[in-house]
Amino acid sequence: MPKFVTIGYGDQDGYNRTDAAVRAAAHTHDAHLRATGVHMGVAGTPVQVQNHDDAGTTVTSGPFMSSPLPVAGFAIIEAATLERAIQLVSRTPCAVARGVVEVWPLQESP
């Protein structure tokens, strides 16, 4: 079955402005997704890793990506179609609490 990487973006202000019942339902939905095998987690502090020309590894603290909202978390989901993946993430906390969720199809490596 196809796999998708999801990236949730959101901030505390947007979360706080969302009705508590909507937030609770979104967290219940996340719990259901985890119970059905979705791997998800809250984003920690990132590092950038470079090893240009295999000449030595350099590690720099901080994200490489930039966004108006902070990265809140990631998930790996399986879904038959992109449309189904979108349906699954459309009820998660970032999607309902004034954030956004990106859905990236994972393609097989050659």
Image: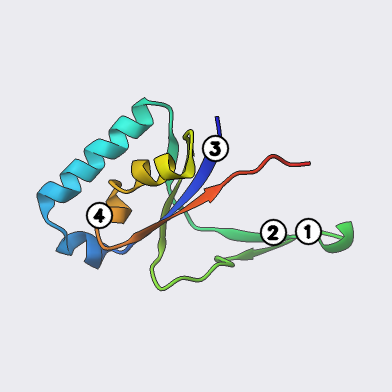
Please state which of the two labelled residues, at mark 3 or mark 2, is closer to the viewer: 3
Q: Nearer the viewer, residue 45 or 40?
A: 40
Q: Tell me what residue is drawn at x 56 percent, y 35 percent.
A: 2
The CA span between labels 2 and 4 is 33 Å
Q: Residues within 10 Å of mark 3 (few under 14, many from 20)?
A: some
Image mark for residue 65: none
Measure the C-alpha gap from mark 1 to mark 3. Answer: 30 Å
Task: Check disc 3 and report the residue beneath it.
Answer: 3
Q: Identify the secondary structure beneath mark 3.
A: strand
Residue 40 place in picture, x, y as percent: 43, 40
Q: Amino acid at mark 4?
A: Val
The residue that mark 2 highlights is: 49
Q: Earlier in the sequence, mark 1 or mark 3?
A: 3
Q: State the quadrant of the N terminus.
A: top right
User: Which of pointers 2 and 1 lies earlier in the amino acid sequence?
Assistant: 2
Q: Quadrant of the C terminus?
A: top right
Mark 2 or 4 closer to N-term? 2
Of pointers 1 and 4, the one earlier in the residue sequence: 1
CB-based contact (under 8 Å), mark 1 and mark 4: no
Counting from the top left corner in percent of width and height, residue 37 is at 43, 27
Residue 58 is situated, as x and y percent measured from the top left of the image, at 74, 63
Say which amino acid is labelled 2: Val
Q: Dot 1 corresponds to which residue?
A: 57
Looking at the image, residue 75 lies above or below residue 72: above
- Residue at screen point 37% across, 31% down: 34
Along the polypeptide, which appears first: circle 3 or circle 4?
Answer: 3
Tag in front: 1 or 3: 3
